[in-house]
Structures are given as C-alpha cells and as structure tokens.
Amino acid sequence: MRRAIGLMSGTSLDGIDVALIESDGESVRVLRKGNDQVAALGPTGYREYAQAERALLSRALRDAEAVAARTDRPGCLPEAEAFLTDAHAEAVEAFLSDNTLTPADIAAIGFHGQTVLHRPREKLTVQIGDGAALARRLGIPVVADLRAEDVARGGQGAPLVPVFHRALAQAAGYAGPLAVLNIGGVANVTLIDSKGNLLAFDTGPGNAPINDWMKEREGVAYDAGGARAAGGQIDEALVAWLLTHPYFERTPPKSLDRHWFSHKLAGHLSTADGAATLTAFAARAIRKSLDHVSSDEQPMRWIVAGGGTRNLTLMAMLGDLLGDRLVNADTLGWSADYLEAQAFAYLALRSLEGLPITYPSTTGVSAPAPGGVLHHP
C-alpha cells in the first residue's frame, strides 16, 4: 500500500478538493466502523476559490470554445492555467503541513486539472493545469491528463471514477446491485451489478445550470440548501420537454459537456420557479438513468456524493423518485464532498502500476485502457 493525494476542481468552480488515500492500485485501505460503514479513508482538505478566481475560470470556459487542439490556449487560458497550477500547489502545501506530512511520504499526486472543453466525439478533451510545473514545485510525482488517453482511443473520457467506486464498495463489503451517484456540475452514476460488472455514464445536468441561474439572477454562486428552488413552482411542461432530448435515449456509456443544457432555457421564469425547474430536471434525469438497467439489476441502494448533496431540495426530489434506497455517502462513512478527489488519488496509483482506469462499459473505449501522464519532480 502506498499513499497518494488526489486533487479535484470540478465543473461547479467552487474550489479544490484534496484527499489522501492508501492503496496498491487495486484494493483500498479503510478504517472499518461496523458492518455497514467505512469510518475513513484518509484526511481531506479544501482550498476555496475567491470570487475573482471563479470569474477567471468562468472566462476560461468561454474562451475555450475557440480551442481546436488540446494544446491551444486562446484568450485568458494561459493566465487561468498558471493560476490553477499555483492554487493546486498551495492546496497541497497546506494539506501536507496540516497533516504533518512531507513530500517523501507521498507516492504520487492525481491531478485532474480544470476541464474547460469536453468534446469526445471530436476526440478532444482539455483540462488546464501544468502537471510538470506542479511536480517540480512540490517535489512529488504528478499523474495528470487522466482523460486524454481514453478519448484518443475512442472513449468518452468520462466518467473516470467507476473503478474506484467498485473498489470502495468491495472494501465496504457490499454485494448486489448498487448505484453510486455523484452530483457535481454534471451528474454521473456508476452502476455495479450483482456480478461486480460496471456500467457508468453521465445522467444529465447536475449543479451547473442551477449555479449559473443563481449567478445570473442574484449574483450568488449557488442555491444555498436549495432554498430558492423550495419556494418555486416547477414548470412541468419545460421539464418534460427537456427530457425528450436525444441524449437521454442514447445507450450508455455516454458523457456530457457542462454547457449542453443551459440555464437560459428557463429564462422566462421567475428566479424561484427557474431554480425549482432546473433542480427538478436534474433529479428526473437521474431517475431516467434507470431506463438503461434491466429489471433484475435495479440498484438496491443509491449512494449519493458530490456538491448536490447539500441541495436539500434536490435530495428531497430524489428521495421522492428513488425512495428509501437513497443514502447520503456521509451516513455510510464515505465522503460526499471528497469522493472524487479520493478517486483521482486511486487513479494515480493505478496509472503508476500500469493498470486500466477506463473500460468499454464505463467510457465506451474499445478495450480496457490505462491513462495518465507521469511527471517527475
């Protein structure tokens, strides 16, 4: 078992999640708490983006629309990439100090970077962040560009975390059909059947359209606790129409770009009604993912993680749709906030071992594929 740190800056643009795990690239070391809980994987940390920093990353997302090749950096992307790399270095330095760790204690860092463009059909996915510079500054090997190899081999490049979800489920002793749902800017699900086989895909929008709506209407980063949505009326006709999008009928695996479903579709609604409608759309798209699961493999449990778990209205809607099968990852001793960062630490260790990180049933890649580019200090 070796220690690795995972770093995640997601599509919600809220900040950098930092997490440490111990693994051999296959099994995961956990502290157990009873028969149904994992007490801990390792320490975690967080580096929040300031408003101006979020604004810079938002501009980078817009400027990235002009990207035609992975190395293109039009507009403010060079500035955003330099900032992002420095911010991740600061986050790791603070994490090491807070946990009395040294660079020598860490075998590798899994560095996701910031996705600014994701067009797998064009074999194009771009995550800004300089892995080589990060390795030099920290004195720790960095595994970056974890999506590129999969996309180059014809995969969707997302989601990447299903193999970690399976390892964590095995460590916890779970058997039977299981769903692990992550609600970030985009929502994705890992479905583990009774034989341990994986099926994974993006279910649809998550927090991103809601966040963009609140930013445009009220100048705030998100709908805190889902309070605005709780006070609104759902435009049922709009939600029904949105769910007719061809994406939802497409056979998985499949993935979305953050911008596929714009908050502007609700532009005619009041702030509260728009928040309620976009939240209902996310929840019902998640429920619709079960259309791709056979009747005998319907999940016995849905373990939910990601920033969406803090949206109480969204969670209540999911509870109405999925019933008592819905469980917040935190209640099991998993980490609702840091599951993806933990996953990128795990993927870094798999990459060091030359093990596959994506599969035909998770990204559509033609065969199990390795991934990641290793940068030495």
Image (tube, grey):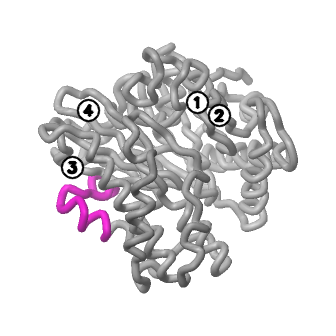
* Residue type, numbered disc 2: Thr
Helix, strand or loop at label 2? It is strand
Q: Tell me, yes or no, whether the two marked residues, 4 and 1, touch with CB atoms within 8 Å.
A: no
Q: Earlier in the sequence, mark 3 or mark 2?
A: 2
**152 shown above or below 75:** above
Helix, strand or loop at label 1? It is loop
Helix, strand or loop at label 3? It is strand
Helix, strand or loop at label 4? It is helix
What whole-number distance in Å separates the C-alpha atoms at marks 2 and 1?
Answer: 7 Å
User: In the drawing, what numbered circle is on residue 301?
Assistant: 3
**Magenta span covers which residues?**
316-332
- Seen from the viewer's position, the closer of residues 70 and 26 is 70
Local crowd size for mark 2, using a 10 Å CA cut-off: few (<14), some (14–19), many (≥20): many
Q: Earlier in the sequence, mark 1 or mark 3?
A: 1
User: In the drawing, what numbered circle is on residue 125?
Assistant: 2
Residue designated by label 4: 170
Quadrant that contains the C terminus: top right
